[in-house]
Image (cartoon, helix red, strand yellow):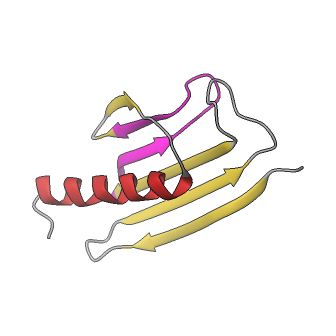
Amino acid sequence: MKARELLRRRVADEFGGFAEYVVWLLPQPLPPSQHPYKYRLAYVVDQRCVLRYDNERGKGDHRHFDGVEQPYTFSSPRRLVADFEADIARWQHENRRP
């Protein structure tokens, strides 16, 4: 099986920012991740990435929230998107964006 793109989407928000979603299904896991997905989700505001979820080779699953990197427990692409969108709402609330 070759890698297959499952999701590629860019969504602008009313504040001039955007959320970008990219998820691939791989033939085998990307070490040290234990699942067969490669992903990169980013929320950019005022040309600055304020939130990112990714699983680059060697680092595994993690997220960056306002410049702080933390481990992320991946369970499914659907849960990944839900967690990402919840963090976007949290960031908007904490930064006074309705």
In front here: 1 or 55? 1
State the count of labels.
0
Q: Nearer the viewer, residue 14 or 82?
A: 82
Q: Position of residue 18 (x, y in %)?
A: 40, 66
Picture residue at 63% right of the left edge, 23% below the top? 32
Query: Residue 59 lies in magenta, yes or no?
Result: yes
Do we see residue 47 in this rendering?
no
Work out whether residue 80 can be spotted.
Answer: yes
Q: Residue at x 45, y 35 (%)?
A: 73
The structure residue drawn at horizontal position 51% and vertical position 33%, both measured from the top left corner, is 61
Looking at the figure, which quarter contains the C terminus? bottom left
| Residue 35, above or below 20 | above
Quarter-of-image position of residue 58: top right
Q: Residue 22 location, x and y as percent?
A: 59, 57
71 is within the stretch colored magenta = no
Region in magenta: 45-64
Residue furthest to the front in view is 75
